[in-house]
Amino acid sequence: MTATNDLRLHDMQTAHVLAQRMRRIAEGQWAFWLEHGPDRECGGFHGQLDRRGLPMGNGEKGLVQQARHLWSLSTWYERREPSQELAKLAQGLYEYIIEHFADRSNAGFFRKIDRNGKVTEAVHQVYPEAFAVYALATYGRVFGDKSAIERALRCFEAFDSRVYEPTFGGYDLTGDPPWQTPGANKETNTHIHVMEALTALGEVCLEPLVHQRLREFTELTITKLGQPAHYAHLEFSMDYTPFGEPKVSYGHDMETSWLVLEAMRVLHTKRVAAPLPERIGHDALEMGKAAAIGGFDADKGGYFYAGITSGAVTDREKVYWVQFEALPALVRLHQTGMLPDALHRLTRTLGWLEQSQVDGKYGGVYWGVLPDGTLGPYGDSKGGHWKASYHDLRALMFAADWLEPISKLDSAPRIG
């Protein structure tokens, strides 16, 4: 047997072990969310959970978290457990979102409600509404609910007509996300998640505007948000001049790399909009590769939070979603041959998760772990407005299934 064949066999064996490890972690995560997440008294999922998974706080629920849980329920049903129990739970959450978050137009969705279902933030914001589109399109596809897909389309059309900026493309987000720095007009995080939402909607909807925007957002993610140093700048002026100091968000860049490949897959298979050039996929992988190298903790495994373009790490907290977004990114980098030691980095990242980020006593994962081993500012709480079942289950399902496909849902990545 040649050295090349030996290496290929070793990689296949390693991939099998890694896929099984990710499926085991996912089972543990799913068990935690299924037991503790649903609010069986008031509906939806609990807004905040403590370390043991018990409800805490004032019970307020956000559209982002509820939509993310709906996406997870639908996708777990599709990929892992097509049971009547899950179908009923997903339907209940879908109906809860429609009943309590939808505005009177039945197109947009408000940002937050209290535990009793009363709107507390009657705000239309692109980021949470993009997750509503993502969840409703996925729920509608998995369960064959055309009304959910239609609601997703109407929601997209509503925020697109509100904030689309035709001169330079993309969305004018001035004053839209509350975290955006005053003076900035556009920001990366919202744009990549709109791309993600349109990828899901484009799977089940052939409306030309959906695919035109998906193509535009996929291209601008690499050509406007992406920079020559292979990272996505975080904020911009209206014409995409970078706003503020350069900062590399390792998790976002790895996430972006594989989300672009998924968007290109849908554009290629549906063929509603013109195809994108192959360099878009290649440059997305270069972005993922730069983050996979620059943010990696070679000592303990896993990924730091942020750094600068020179390669220096500036924020060494290990945030849970960064670790999870590394998994599908590393799989795609391995499969495309862009990062020869991707499986090694994946192995070390899983080791970090299993040993230090997963709570072996109560289940779930900690938000962040500092270099000295103590928990970060988020503490030991397990659920919140920004912490739902989405980053962990999505990454673990996709990465495991891409390494070892178990259904027709999965295939090798398409770059061009």
Image (spheres, rainbow, N blue to C red):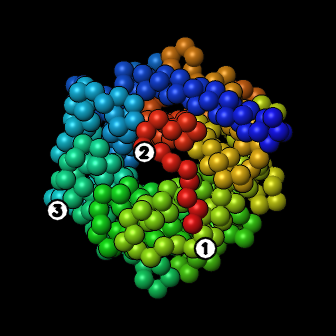
Determine whether, in the image, residue 390 is placed left or right of residue 209.
Answer: right
Q: Where does residue 337 sit, x and y in percent of width and height?
A: 71, 52
Res 133 quadrant in image: bottom left
Q: Where does residue 165 sit, x and y in percent of width and height?
A: 43, 79
Closer to the chain start, of discs 2 and 3, is 3
Vertical relation: 121 (above or below) 192: above
Residue with the most extreme bottom position:
167
Residue that label 2 marks: 409
Picture mark count: 3
Vertical relation: 179 (above or below) 29: below
Determine the secondary structure under disc 2.
loop
Q: CA distance from mark 3 to mark 1?
A: 35 Å
Which is more foreground, mark 1 or mark 2? 2
Is 107 in front, or is 267? Answer: 267
Res 46 quadrant in image: top left
Residue with the most extreme front position:
1
Q: CA distance from mark 2 to mark 3?
A: 35 Å
Q: Where does residue 308 sit, x and y in percent of width and height?
A: 76, 57
The residue lying at 29 percent from left, 44 percent from top is 142
| Residue 105, disc | 3
Residue that label 1 marks: 223
Residue 384 shows in the view? no
The residue lying at 61 percent from left, 73 percent from top is 223
Is 199 in front, or is 271? Answer: 271
Determine the secondary structure under disc 1.
helix
Give the residue type that dot 3 points to: Ser
Determine whether, in the image, residue 98 is placed left or right of residue 174.
Answer: left
Give the residue type that dot 2 points to: Leu
Give the residue type that dot 1 points to: Thr
Determine whether, in the image, residue 300 is placed left or right of residue 227.
Answer: right
Is 331 in front, or is 242? Answer: 331
